[in-house]
Amino acid sequence: MRSGYPARFLRCAAGLLMSGTGYYLTVQATSIGIGAWETLQTGLSLRTGISYGNCTVMVSFAVILIDLLLKGKIGFGTVMNGVMVGKIVDFWHRYCNFLPATHSLPLGILYLLAGQIVVSVGMVVYMKAQLGCGPRDTLMVELGKRFPKANIGVVRFFIDIAALMAGALLGAPYGWGSVFAITCNSFILQGVFRIFKFESRSLRHEDIVDTVRNIRGRG
């Protein structure tokens, strides 16, 4: 068990790098309208003057509190997700900006679809490390467990709609493209999970205490 941790942490980090890059792509699809959580984080950024990436981190830790109320496991992967994803988006945007924002509708759709595919594949990669889901993904999984007959994509859809409404109330830009983005995300997420034969609700994640105990050889 202990010998597997370096590979598991690397797997988790690689998946989060993919997810952060995917979110960067969706943020750059300005002609479509940004996604749900991006809307919420943009609204916070506009209201507070804090960078988008730092607002992402703030939202992540706020969602962790909700996860705890739902008795979700908070692992090293949860914390890594909460910190890394927003910082990766900031890194690409501030220092590389390898994909400038587009105002072309066809290109915006391409950005959006490509970004959401990359995010979904990244989720599969990092979740399989079983070091804990990210804050938003823990929320999705825990609510999914409470509605086992519901498609996990449908569960994610309603969570994202709530995030979109909160962002709109904070003054973030939104439109038909934002709803389109949420709908696409739900279908793409479910499609990628099916391709990889991945069921997020069946994984047995470790919380931080479990992982520390196992590394020390006490688990």
Image (cartoon, rainbow, N blue to C red):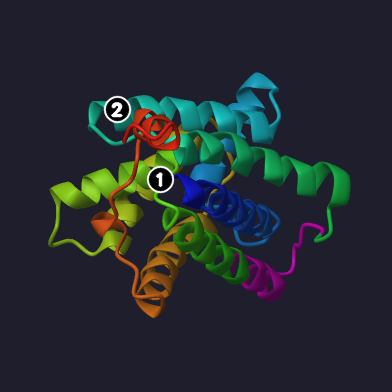
Q: Nearer the viewer, residue 83 or 55?
A: 83
> In the rendered view, would you say 132 is above or below 171?
below
Which image quarter: residue 14? bottom right
Q: Nearer the viewer, residue 14 or 156?
A: 14
Q: Is residue 111 magenta?
A: yes
Between discs 2 and 1, the one toward the N terminus:
2
Spot occupied by residue 187 in the image (x, y as percentages of width and height): 39, 70
Please report the residue visible at 54 percent of the width from the left and 42 percent of the height from the top.
39
Badge 1 is on which residue?
A: 133
Please report the residue visible at 76 percent of the width from the left and 62 percent of the height from the top.
102
> In the rendered view, would you say 60 is above or below 176?
above
Q: Nearer the viewer, residue 91 or 8?
A: 8
Residues drawn in magenta = 100-112
Considering the numbered disc 2 on the image, is that residue within a helix, a strand or a loop?
helix
Alpha-carbon neighbours of circle 1 within 10 Å: few (<14), some, or many (≥20)? many
Alpha-carbon neighbours of circle 2 within 10 Å: few (<14), some, or many (≥20)? some
Which image quarter: residue 184? bottom left
Residue extending farthest to the top is 48
